[in-house]
Image (tube, helix red, strand yellow):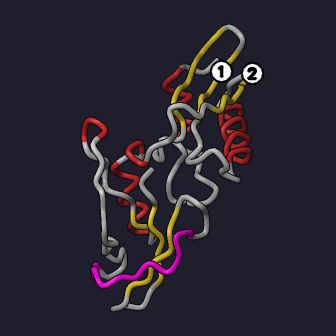
Amino acid sequence: MLTEAQAWQALDAVEDPEIPVVSVTELGIVREVILGEDGLRVVVTPTYSGCPATEMIAESIVDALKAAGAGKVSVETRLAPPWSTDWIAESAREKLRAYGIVPPQPALPDGAQVVRFMSRKLPCPRCGSSHTTRLSEFGSTACKSLYRCEDCREPFEYFKPI
């Protein structure tokens, strides 16, 4: 049987299937690791309820934990509270930026929200220019938008704040 620390260490190596530069723990998808008499249970919250990678993530979690020595492993999907981009680790934000995806800024404290009347100019993750244009509300997945830098002309994605 694995310890909780060993389980978390094994989970740190499970890459997100859509963004392989970050792990499912760095994205905040893994919420809990519960050791019990009936085995190891991992609670996950997908980035959104219709995420097509949810099953693949669950399979990767089970495979990684069994390879690390766990016996029985189960994955529980929990949709409430919904996943938040605030759950992305700071180290993952830098990895996303280097990969070409602009991570969202952390939300305001105490549930405060910002009302924006004009689209915000996002800095290009490649050259840093704020001269960018949103090309599509949806990028390669529904949780990202597609942008282009008007200076270096490179496309990039933005992880939408949720």
In the displayed structure, would residue 82 be above or below residue 48? above
In the displayed structure, would residue 56 be above or below residue 11? below
Question: Where in the figure is residue 26, as x and y percent of width and height?
Answer: 46, 45
Query: Which residue, given by chain and number where applicable, does mark 2 sit on?
Result: 72
Residue at left offset 55%, top offset 24%: 33
Residue at left offset 27%, top offset 43%: 112
- In front here: 140 or 16? 140
Q: Which badge, 2 or 1, is on the more N-terminal residue?
A: 1
Whether the magenta-drawn stretch holds residue 134 is answered as yes
Q: Would you call the spot at circle 2 few (<14 residues within 10 Å), some (14-19), or many (20 or more)?
A: some
The amino acid at mark 2 is Lys
| Circle 2: element type | loop
Please tell me the numbered disc located at residue 40. 1
Residue at left offset 59%, top offset 34%: 79
Quadrant where the N terminus sits is: top right
Is 38 placed left or right of 151 in the picture?
right
What is the residue that sits farthest to the top in this orientation? 37
The amino acid at mark 1 is Leu
| Circle 1: element type | strand
- In front here: 4 or 155? 155
Question: Where in the figure is residue 77, as x and y percent of width and height?
Answer: 65, 33
Question: Where in the figure is residue 132, as x and y percent of width and height?
Answer: 35, 82
The answer to the question of whether label 2 and label 1 lie on touching residues, with beta carbons closer than 8 A, is yes
Numbered-mark total: 2
Is 161 placed left or right of 30 in the picture?
left
Q: Would you call the spot at circle 1 few (<14 residues within 10 Å), some (14-19), or many (20 or more)?
A: many
Q: Which segment did they paint magenta?
A: 128-138
In the displayed structure, would residue 52 be above or below residue 67? below
Whether the magenta-drawn stretch holds residue 110 is answered as no
What is the residue that sits farthest to the front in this orientation? 117
- The image quarter in which residue 115 lies: bottom left
